[in-house]
Image: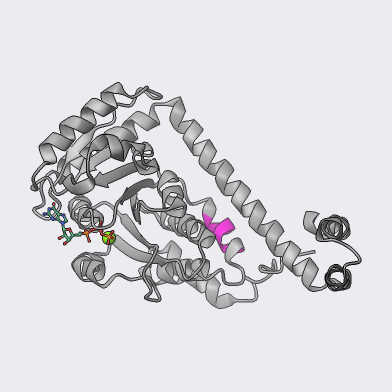
Amino acid sequence: MTDAASPPDTLKSRPILMSVLDKFAAGDHVALARIITAVEDRRNGYQDLLARLYARSGRAWRVGITGPPGAGKSTLVFRLAELLAAQAKKLGIIAVDPTSPFTGGALLGDRIRMQDLSNNPNIFIRSMATRGSTGGLAEATRDATMVLDAFGMDVILIETVGVGQVELDIARACDTVVVVFVPESGDAIQAMKAGLMEIADIYCLNKADREGAERLVVELQSVLGLRKKTTPWEHPVISTQALNNKGIPELWASVAAHREFCQNQATFDHRREQRIADDLQTIIKNKIDRRVQAALRDSESYRNKIAEIAAGTTNPYAAAVELLGEIAGSLAD
Ligand SMILES: Nc1nc2c(ncn2[C@@H]2O[C@H](COP(=O)(O)OP(=O)(O)OP(=O)(O)O)[C@@H](O)[C@H]2O)c(=O)[nH]1
Ligand SMILES: [Mg+2]
């Protein structure tokens, strides 16, 4: 049985998509946007598309910028983008917007600030929206990141609000995770307890122009000094003022240092393997889920079981085991 959501010949039957692929390969941003949209919307054939593009990926460095709402993540991303643009780097930016009610997920403020940069031919900016599904966001973001990687980006910056499991998962899937906090974040020890702080490779204290910033940096450094070390990487604490464009080269230097560190480390291979394992499991689970849905949709005994459970002649546990036996064959092909 074929996957209901992606018949294998879909691409061939859609020559438009093939021409989009040619344009994508030639570096066309419109084609890139269309492909990300097709992937984000899980359009027919998107898996074949991803399978084709995967071989081109693996070169980009993924940098997660995460932290509490309003910490200045977008401003930092904007400043980093300016810095990288000046170095003629090819840059992909994904802003993951977990709560915005706007379709398309665009935050107006972010958009306006990014407008100048979005005209730069080396920079591509994309917002990802939840569109009501939680699990799907992490996947769609991962796939969009892979597409950007395959497009030939040197760096991909991914902004997520560090609230909630999905956003943490997205950040964790990056090669370097920058956790942004601000003087108002409260005392560093409290902050360390939150899952957010534990995923950091680099701590960025933004809004360092505000009162209490220096004290917080010292406090965080002392907490980090006390922490049981699980890696030889020395977690830097970088002070920035994104609004005033201060500390940005230092922040980027620490990302570059982390990249260098990772590329000389077996731990990095482990992290990359872990990411591949996570991706693979998610892809398998989703495929199984779609096949289960398709098999049950066509199953008469499924409808009969529902009636029997409602009538009290069987129970859902026994019915599930029987139905699984019936549809098992269709899950494996
Ligand atoms: N004082 C001060 N304000 C800053 C600094 N950086 C950013 N801001 C301000 O903080 C506010 C929030 O900035 P954003 O960049 O939108 O923050 P964000 O973390 O992306 O916010 P969300 O995406 O909504 O979570 C804006 O008004 C910025 O101008 C800074 O270094 N100092
Ligand atoms: Mg933002």
Q: How many marks?
A: 0
Identity of the residue drawn at 43% across and 55% down: 145
Considering only vertical position in the picture, is 211 above or below 215?
below
Could you say where residue 187 lies in the image, as x and y percent from the top left? 22, 38
* Residue 224 shows in this picture: yes
Residue situated in front as seen by the camera: 300 or 140? 300
Identity of the residue drawn at 60% across and 76% down: 14
Q: Where does the magenta region start and end?
A: 48-53
Name the residue at the right extreme.
Answer: 313
Point out the quarter of the image occupied by ligand 1.
Answer: bottom left
Considering only vertical position in the picture, is 58 above or below 30?
above
Could you say where residue 40 lies in the image, as x and y percent from the top left? 49, 67
- Corner quadrant of residue 73: bottom left
Chief SS of the magenta region: helix
Q: Which quadrant does the N terminus fall into?
A: bottom right
Q: Which quadrant does the C terminus fall into?
A: bottom right
Left or right relative to 11: residue 16: left
- Corner quadrant of residue 220: top left
* Residue 256 shows in this picture: no
Could you say where residue 84 lies in the image, as x and y percent from the top left? 22, 51
